[in-house]
Amino acid sequence: MGSYQGMMQGAPEVSRPAGEGCKAGGVRVEVSRVSTCPRPGMPCYMSEQASGFDLEACLTQDVKLSPGERALIPTGLRLAIPRGFEGQVRPRSGLAARHGVTVLNTPGTIDSDYRGEICVILINLGSELYTISHGDRVAQLVIAPTTRADLVEVESLDTTGRGEGGFGSTGVSTGEVPGNE
């Protein structure tokens, strides 16, 4: 696969028009391109009501993912996400359905104070080799509001009908009623 820096240096340009950005009528997110990765266009929502915008691979050479293999894929982008929001890196459903390629730590969280390059951890859960090339849309990013919690230590928690049941304790079938096994 080569080194991370080697993948970025001399990346070919993606042929799509440059613009001032993608205005979707939402929260302002500033986008900066990594200087070692030429990108003539900006990420943009692919439909009027899309929740996320696509992230493209920024590579100087193809990355080949064998079944079971994972790789860190650079995007060539840095973001300034406003305080009170996060970026959620999510899989593209078509890649997962057709090839078994997905985001390993989904959703990957991009905190509002992070200013480094956005990279995507992809894993091939399919049965065939998958090749990622420069400009391929490898994931999507959703900007979402966050809530910070006030964590308070207590002696005990209130009781609920579920209690400590987890990991399938509520059943699988809609006809199952917890506690009536």
Image (cartoon, grey):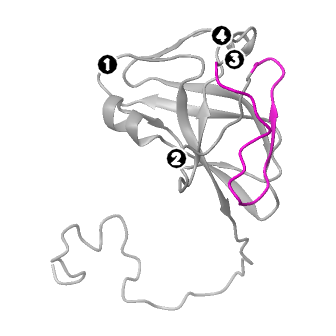
Q: Residue 4, labelled with which disc?
A: 3
Residue that badge 4 annotates: 60
**Picture layout, residue 23 above or below residue 100:** below
Give me the C-alpha separation between circle 2 and circle 4. 25 Å
User: Which of marks 4 and 3 precedes in the sequence?
Assistant: 3
- Residue at image position (23%, 83%) is 179
User: Which of marks 4 and 1 precedes in the sequence?
Assistant: 4
**Picture layout, residue 120 above or below residue 163:** above
The one of 129 and 39 positioned closer to us in this rendering = 39
* Amino acid type, label 4: Thr
Name the secondary structure under disc 1.
loop
Instruction: Indicate the quadrant where residue 74 lies.
Output: top right
Give me the C-alpha separation between circle 3 and circle 2. 21 Å
Q: Position of residue 140 (x, y in %)?
A: 56, 42
Q: Position of residue 64 (x, y in %)?
A: 47, 14
Residue that badge 2 annotates: 106
Name the secondary structure under disc 2.
loop
Q: Position of residue 71 (x, y in %)?
A: 55, 24
* Amino acid type, label 2: Thr
User: Which of marks 1 and 3 precedes in the sequence?
Assistant: 3
Residue that badge 1 annotates: 128
User: Which of marks 2 and 1 precedes in the sequence?
Assistant: 2
Residue 48 in the magenta stretch? The answer is no
Q: Residue 16, labelled with which disc?
A: none
Residue range in magenta is: 15-38
